[in-house]
Image (cartoon, rainbow, N blue to C red):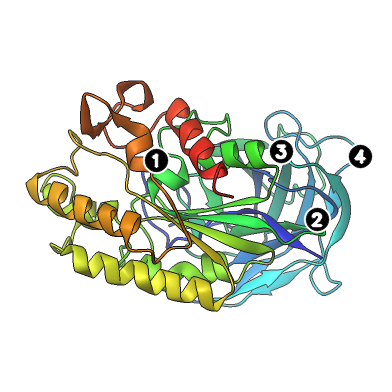
């Protein structure tokens, strides 16, 4: 039985928060990407997404291996990937492909390195903007190279790679569905300190991160991906092995309308709490129809941030009270109260604040994982 061990939710090509290669794409280049697994097994396969491509993307070669330092792969572990028995594959426009499984013994918490070679122009690349870990690009076909010197460019995004699956023989994965807080903004780059990482360490269960920085529950965004009520199936329900879903989404829907300073927040309609509640009900409906246990998380305090204002305070309080008291979710994790400043409950506790009064730091993410683990 295969279960998903790592995911990255696909996004349309965009400028992103840091420089990336999504708009230019790739040609006669290899892309090497490092991902941390939350479940181990003896066999591995990868899922590649061209969800936002308007034409097929040709992958001329691919490999996977156990991660060494930087762009290096541990000697003896580099394994060619095939697709339907062949070394090459075309990812259909707006589609995806899954590789054949290969023998590679990996442990939970271990990182693997996936290398893709593109011999023809890809066009703009479906990607995940915020990886919070280094990836690499080099000229030519480097899929069989264990050493890293040929990879002379560095990125902090993932490209085309949307999942790694292992034969874990279990179906108890926990998916986290949210925005930049779930994605891990504010955690230490390269240290795997997102709350999804912390939760996997605490529970020993596979944990899938389906967060997208800036994502909205009810509206699409050119920068921040498709709205949550539309992307849930692709980013969670279609992955094998998931049995529990934790929802932490809606803060951007509330907060984007509070500022005129960030053009990527637009358009930002002013929403009522009832509209957000309807969005949560739709997520619950979809998750339950797929047989998942649904856990609702209250929005974290965000007073003092650029998302805060009198209306944001009112709507967030109403939404959080509904999550706590409605009984619609199978369980509730009150992250708002767990991370609040005792002296001002509308603000993050200073020791948990990354510095923007919106995102937790490593310590805050650890607390989130601790609170959620008690409900699994």
Residue 223 in view (yes/no): no
Query: Looking at the image, do the residues carrying marks 4 and 2 touch, with CB atoms under 8 Å apart?
Result: no
Within 10 angstroms of label 3, few (less than 14), some, or many (20 or more) residues?
some
Q: Which residue is mark 1?
A: 18
The image quarter in which residue 160 lies: bottom right
User: Measured along the vertical axis of the image, is residue 331 above or below residue 345?
Assistant: below
Tell me the SS state at disc 3. loop
Foreground: 293 or 234? 293
Q: Residue at x 67, y 50 (%)?
A: 206
Tell me the SS state at disc 4. loop
Q: Is residue 167 left or right of residue 221?
A: right
Choose the circle earlier in sequence order: 4 or 2.
4
Choose the circle earlier in sequence order: 1 or 4.
1
Residue 333 in view (yes/no): yes
- Distance CA(mark 4)–CA(mark 2): 22 Å
- Distance CA(mark 3)–CA(mark 4): 20 Å
Choose the circle earlier in sequence order: 3 or 2.
3
- Distance CA(mark 1)–CA(mark 4): 34 Å
Q: Which residue is mark 3?
A: 109
Q: Is residue 375 left or right of residue 222?
A: right
Query: Looking at the image, do the residues carrying marks 1 and 4 touch, with CB atoms under 8 Å apart?
Result: no
Query: Looking at the image, do the residues carrying marks 3 and 4 touch, with CB atoms under 8 Å apart?
Result: no
User: Measured along the vertical axis of the image, is residue 199 above or below residue 312?
Assistant: above
Label placed on residue 76: 4
- Distance CA(mark 3)–CA(mark 1): 26 Å
């Amino acid at each position: 039985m295969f279960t998903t061990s790592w995911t990255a939710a696909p996004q349309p090509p965009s400028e992103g928060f840091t420089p990336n290669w999504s708009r230019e794409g790739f040609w006669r280049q290899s892309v090497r990407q490092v991902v941390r697994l939350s479940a181990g097994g003896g066999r591995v396969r990868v899922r590649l997404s061209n969800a936002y491509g308007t034409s097929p993307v040709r992958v001329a070669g691919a490999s996977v291996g156990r991660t060494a330092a930087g762009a290096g792969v541990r000697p003896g572990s580099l394994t060619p990937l095939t697709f339907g028995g062949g070394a090459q594959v075309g990812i259909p426009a707006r589609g995806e492909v899954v590789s054949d499984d290969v023998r590679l013994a990996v442990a939970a918490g271990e990182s693997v390195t996936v290398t893709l070679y593109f011999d023809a122009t890809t066009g703009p690349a479906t990607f995940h903007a915020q990886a919070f870990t280094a990836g690499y690009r080099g000229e030519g076909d480097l899929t069989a190279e264990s050493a890293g010197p040929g990879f002379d460019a560095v990125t902090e995004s993932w490209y085309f790679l949307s999942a790694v699956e292992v034969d874990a023989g279990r179906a108890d994965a926990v998916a986290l569905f949210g925005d930049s807080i779930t994605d891990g903004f504010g955690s230490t780059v390269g240290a795997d300190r997102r709350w999804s990482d912390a939760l996997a360490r605490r529970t020993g269960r596979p944990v899938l991160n389906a967060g997208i920085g800036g994502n909205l529950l009810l509206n699409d965004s050119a920068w921040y991906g498709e709205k949550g009520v539309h992307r849930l199936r692709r980013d969670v329900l279609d992955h094998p092995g998931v049995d529990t879903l934790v929802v932490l989404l809606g803060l951007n829907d509330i907060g984007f309308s509070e500022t005129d300073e960030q053009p990527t927040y637009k358009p930002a309609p002013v929403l009522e709490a009832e509209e957000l509640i309807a969005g949560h009900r739709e997520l619950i409906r979809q998750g339950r129809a797929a047989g998942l246990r649904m856990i609702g998380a209250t929005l974290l305090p965000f007073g003092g941030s650029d998302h805060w204002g009198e209306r944001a305070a009112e709507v967030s309080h109403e939404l959080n009270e509904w999550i706590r008291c409605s009984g619609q979710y199978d369980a509730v994790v009150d992250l708002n109260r767990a991370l609040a400043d005792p002296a001002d409950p509308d603000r993050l506790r200073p020791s948990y604040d990354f510095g923007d009064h919106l995102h937790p730091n490593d310590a805050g993410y650890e607390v989130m994982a601790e609170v959620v683990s008690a409900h699994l």
